[in-house]
Amino acid sequence: MFVSFTPLFGLHFVAAGLLAWAVSGNVLAALIGTLVGNPLTFPFIAVLSVDLGRRMLGIDGHVGPQVILSEVGRAIGEVATNLLTLTSDRAPQWGHLGAVFEQIIWPYFIGGLLPGFAAAIVAHALTVSIVQTYQRRRALRRARKRPEPTEPPSPDQRPPTA
């Protein structure tokens, strides 16, 4: 879930899997946790993270979700265009990418740390509690289904052997 609070758009799944693997965590649980970052929640996560990061870094001004999306999209386009310059005679232009990094991406990384950790801790606590409750209930159901153990017959009650 923590990774969903980073600006690694398109890489959350990979980053969560690698992070879980690196700390010997449950990779499947980490991948499921990335679902908190989805088209419905990303605008809220992005605005919260960028605004908090800008405040922490001393950068004035509020940045809305439309600006974040358009600027990140424009930066991705600039990277793609500059990669294509490797096969042409044009010189790469990195001017916009630096400004987007300074105004959006870096504040997003910094500002996403606190809410990301908080969300991850809350999710972990809830998940552990839910799994423990499920396991206790499953153990009780299994115990109820098992037949009662019977006492072995005493030597007086054993059938004669031939």
Image: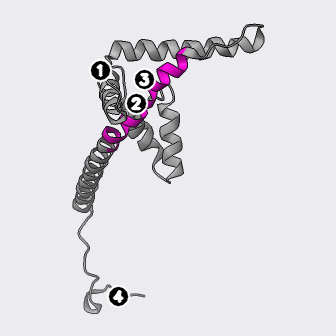
Please give the residue where the numbered disc 1 appears in the rendered image: 62
Front position in the image: 41 or 83:
83
On the question of residue 133 being in view, the answer is yes
Q: Amino acid at mark 4?
A: Pro
Q: Residue at x 78, y 7 (%)?
A: 89
In the depicted structure, whether residue 30 falls above or below residue 108: below
Q: Are marks 4 and 2 in contact (CB under 8 Å)?
A: no
* Picture disc at residue 103: 3
Q: Is residue 126 magenta?
A: no
**Which quarter shows the C terminus?**
bottom left
Residue 58 in picture, x, y percent from top left: 34, 32
Q: Marks 3/4: CA distance?
A: 92 Å
Which residue is the site of mark 4? 160
Q: Which residues are magenta?
A: 96-117
The percent coordinates of residue 69 (x first, y second) are 41, 15
Foreground disc of the pair 3, 4 = 3
Seen in the image, is 6 located left or right of residue 142?
A: right
- Give the amino acid type for the residue marked by disc 2 in the picture: Pro
Q: CA distance from mark 4 to mark 2?
A: 86 Å
**Residue 62, picture quadrant:** top left
Q: Residues within 10 Å of mark 3 (few under 14, many from 20)?
A: many
Q: Are marks 3 and 2 in contact (CB under 8 Å)?
A: yes
What distance separates the C-alpha of mark 3 from that of mark 2? 7 Å
Observer-nearest residue: 101 or 43?
A: 101
Is disc 4 surrounded by few (<14), some (14 to 19) or many (20+) residues within 10 Å? few
Q: Which residue is denoted by mark 2 in the rendering?
A: 107
Dot 2, how many residues are within 10 Å of its Cα: few (below 14), some (14-19), or many (20+)? many
Q: Amino acid at mark 3?
A: Gln
- Name the mark on residue 15: none
Q: Secondary structure at mark 4?
A: loop
Query: Where is residue 95 shown, x and y percent of the image?
Result: 57, 15
